Image (spheres, rainbow, N blue to C red):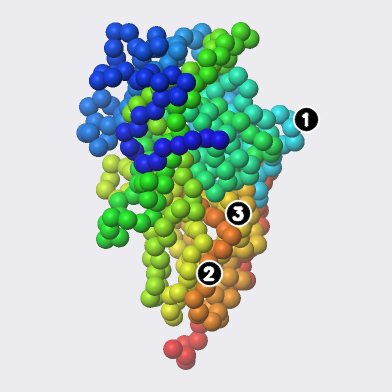
Amino acid sequence: MSQYMSGFGNEHVSEDPRCPGALPEGQNNPQVCPYGLYAEQLSGSAFTCPRPANKRSWLYRILPSVCHKPFKPLKEGHLTHNWDEVEPDPNQLRWKPFEIPKAPQNKLDFVSGLHTLCGAGEPRGRNGIAVHIFVCNISMMDRCLYNSDGDFLIVPQQGKLLITTEFGKMLVEPNEICVIQQGMRFSVEVFGETRGYILEVYGAHFELPDLGPIGANGLANPRDFLVPVAWYEDRQVPGGYTVISKYQGKLFAAQQDFSPFNVVAWHGNYTPYKYHLEKFMVINSVAFDHADPSIFTVLTAKSTRPGVAVADFVIFPPRWGVANNTFRPPYYHRNCMSEFMGLIKGHYEAKEEGFQPGGASLHSMMTPHGPDADCFEKASKAKLEPERIAEGTMAFMFESSLSLAVTKWGLQTSNHLDKNYYKCWEPLKSHFNPNCK
């Protein structure tokens, strides 16, 4: 059973109970560490960042992570940050649920099962994002991944993930999310056919959104974020342990003869973490009209422009709808942001038929979108009583101020693009009557 400490961005301290006193007292880097361990700092920010933004952790490990053979290129498969593979497509895009291969025919672990769907920017300039789909059917065996380019926000949709990190283990199930920050080594164990979504952010870390007039409490509360406790394995791997680096959008592999999960103790504020989406405190309109969907923001990665995010992670959880004299589903909309949506479970209220768990949609910058014709007709005639919305459902959105390009895999190779998506709006008809106000 995985154990955790709670709190977002806290200074945490953790020792594997098998080695009490493994953390040096009163300093980070003594001449000789307890138990003969090596001290290693993992920096997630520039040394000179202001204190509120400064991220680092000290790891006390059996061997330092520098003990490996040279990195060599590894085939990337469908992982890319080449946004010019195909011509831009401004259309409303929707994908049917992405297929999980069957294990005997096509064995895929978390790394080989990464497929880039869309993105913008590039990792060398430290500004941009990518959206990936992962489909896998086997666990990572004697291999781990770390992302030199940015942070991974992982949203499992089918199947649970047991993620071993240098900081400890996290069990992440559908309706939970986890964030593995830049540089952190991790390995993913699965228990059958597994699928999910990843938001990758270059150059910024996720943080809790400012609450403004909401006040001190609400949305995702800091204490509900969980950080793993120290756990180590002192394991030799004579056949070779593979450390994979995602670097400048490509994969590289290095061999070493021991497990990288050999951290006996650690302290700091730069950690992996997980969060259960059911813990989100929903804010909603209780009089009339809609509040903007920004009230559903769980995490944000800010840009240098005030109030403008490189990426927001937004959810649409079960809640009460009580607004009077109001068209309650999402309204028709054109946005200066890009909106990528996924569905973990249930039926999304604005498009109950075509938008399915494990699928996705992308409404690009300034491309109009909104409820389909059935939803509009029903909601326009519905009796406005208090009602539960999205019961048994969890949809989410990756929203970005960047204009996202779709990959060749997304538009062509995956063969899961719904070519008939536009037809859901075709039955919309004019109700205009100049004689009736």
Q: Check the image and report above or below for 250 versus 357.
A: above
**Percent x, y of residue 329:** 50, 68
Classify mark 3: residues with Cα within 10 Å, few (<14), some (14-19) or many (20+): some
- Pinpoint residue 6: horizontal percent, then vertical percent: 40, 41
Residue type (three-letter) at the residue carrying disc 3: Lys
Residue behind mark 3: 345
Residue 104 is marked as 1
Which quarter of the figure has residue 58? top left
Under circle 1, the secondary element is loop
Q: CA distance from mark 3 to mark 1?
A: 27 Å
Element carrying mark 2: strand
Q: Earlier in the sequence, mark 2 or mark 3?
A: 3
> Residue, x 38% and y 24% (percent of image)?
266
Residue at position x 48%, y 28% in the image: 168
Q: Earlier in the sequence, mark 3 or mark 1?
A: 1
Q: Which mark is residue 372?
A: none
Under mark 2, the amino acid is Arg
- x 22%, y 33%: residue: 50
Q: Is residue 161 among the parts visible in the rendering?
A: yes
Eye-nearest disc, 1 or 2: 2
Contact, CB < 8 Å: mark 3 with mark 1?
no
Determine if residue 85 is in view.
no
Question: What's the CA distance linking mark 1 and mark 2?
Answer: 43 Å
What residue occupies the far bottom of the structure in this picture? 435
Q: Report the residue at 57% width, 16% height from top.
A: 242
The quadrant in which the C terminus is found is bottom left
The crowd level at tag 1 (other Cα within 10 Å; few <14, some 14-19, many 20+) is: few
Would you name the residue on which mark 2 appears?
Answer: 388
Nearer-the-camera pick, 197 or 170 = 170
